[in-house]
Amino acid sequence: MDATSPAISFDNTEIAFRHKNAADLRKAAFLFTMMNNNFVTKYGTRLTPWAMRIGLPIGGIVKATIFSQFCGGETLDECAVTAEKLSAYHVNTILDYGVEGEEAESRFDENVKEMLRAVATAKSSGHIPFVSMKVTGYARFALLEKVHAKDTLTNEEKAEWERVVQRVDTICKAANDAGIGVMIDAEETWIQQPVDDVSMEMMRVYNKQRPVVYNTAQLYRTDRLSFLKDAISEAKRGGFIYAIKLVRGAYMERERRRAAEKGYPSPIQPNKEASDKDFNAAVELCFENIDHVSQCIATHNEYSSLYGTQLAEKKGIAPSHPHLHFSQLFGMSDNITFNLANAGYNVTKYVPYGPVKEVVPYLMRRAKENTSVGGMSSRELGLIRKEVKRRKE
Ligand SMILES: Cc1cc2nc3c(=O)[nH]c(=O)nc-3n(C[C@H](O)[C@H](O)[C@H](O)COP(=O)(O)OP(=O)(O)OC[C@H]3O[C@@H](n4cnc5c(N)ncnc54)[C@H](O)[C@@H]3O)c2cc1C
């Protein structure tokens, strides 16, 4: 397969970094250099959460550095400003309230309220077509595990599950009324069935006219291509648009470890090539069904992103087709995002927000992902240095 496109080059750093001035570039270069250092990342990702927890006054440093690189702001108002800035380059925003790991019912209800505020911000912004949510922000993990395993629920648990569905429905309905969409994240395989089921239930209700609710498929799972085929057939039969965010998957080590510990076959592809193959096949499958399927190609992989544009070109599908979206995380792979946007594609940045203290787990994951072991930092650094040099010439 030819991965080069005459129209788009992800090496074009002029377009990639138009939104950054010299100081922004220096700051990004410093951060990626730090994250590229295994020693700094190893100890930084241990010490930062601890220092925040015991109340050391490092919030300001975190906010000025890693937070400002990977988060849109602490509040919705700050995020609306970020969204506005991105929109100047035709990049839209997916709002992601980054608070994680809460297990209390009162907190789940608070999260619904926060999500409704996010929906209202999205509606008034005009540059925020989606909000994103994790079902674990609205349900106890252990309850999801039970529902997934089809264990018999007590009457109390049945009522608890009903409340979870109700919370998800409240968010989807608000998004539908506001004319925006909701992307539901994929999580661990051992809680994913209820997430898939509730997503499908919401699509059945809200995706009749346009794609409002998106589920997520992790193509590092061996079973997701056939899952996608079945889901698309079901949506066709049901007369609604199937909407799906395609990702490779974020929990590979945890999945493999659990499978080994519990002695069941790993649900994860045997190697990276197999994940890549299924990811690209999923992109193609969605294109083949574009009248019935809306896809968001959510990846930092340059080949997969280009492949999406090549398929669009080959099939005569306009870059701005409402069933075709691309997305990258805020602060990463600007070379993909801004070059796709420049070529007229629907592109979004996935923009987490929340109080600094609460988004620290998310930030630590980004730092780990960007170590020299993970490999992303070197690519980011190379591109930033190239742009700094180009501006001097
Ligand atoms: C906008 C956006 C939304 C996202 N939402 C979700 C979500 O809802 N749920 C979720 O789980 N993740 C989500 N992710 C993260 C995503 O799943 C990936 O972890 C991340 O994007 C890296 O994959 P890639 O395609 O960008 O890049 P690549 O660098 O091409 O791929 C890396 C990925 O390949 C896979 N992989 C690597 N090595 C192997 C191996 N040895 N065997 C098998 N597979 C391997 C893993 O999935 C790894 O993360 C999201 C990412 C983006 C950009």
Image (tube, helix red, strand yellow):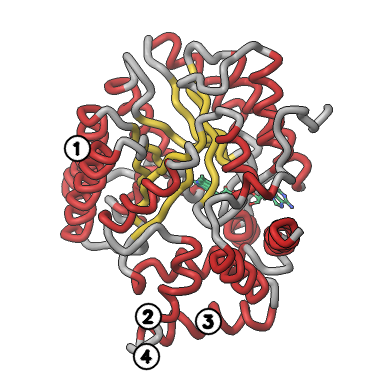
Which residue is disc 1 drawn over?
Answer: 170
Relative to 386, is 26 on the left or the right?
left
Q: Are marks 1 and 4 in contact (CB under 8 Å)?
A: no
Nearer-N-terminus badge (1/4): 4
- Is 32 or 285 nearer to us in this picture? 32
Q: Which mark is residue 56?
A: 4
Q: Are marks 2 and 3 in contact (CB under 8 Å)?
A: no
Name the amino acid, label 4. Leu
Alpha carbon separation for disc pair 1 and 4: 38 Å
Q: Quadrant of the C terminus?
A: bottom right
Which residue is disc 3 drawn over?
Answer: 46
Alpha carbon separation for disc pair 1 and 2: 34 Å
Alpha carbon separation for disc pair 2 and 3: 15 Å
Name the amino acid, label 2. Gly
Q: Where is residue 69? Give x, y as percent.
A: 50, 64
Crowding at mark 3 (Cα within 10 Å: few <14, some 14-19, many 20+): few
Crowding at mark 4 (Cα within 10 Å: few <14, some 14-19, many 20+): few
Residue at 55%, 35% in the rendered image: 341
Alpha carbon separation for disc pair 4 and 2: 8 Å
Name the amino acid, label 3. Arg
Tag nearer the camera, 2 or 3: 2
Alpha carbon separation for disc pair 4 and 3: 14 Å
Relative to 72, is 270 on the left or the right?
right
* Residue 248 appears in view: yes
Crowding at mark 1 (Cα within 10 Å: few <14, some 14-19, many 20+): some
Q: Where is residue 10? Give x, y as percent.
A: 71, 42
Residue at 68%, 21% in the rendered image: 311
In this rendering, the count of numbered labels is: 4
Per the image, label 3 sits on a secondary structure element best described as helix
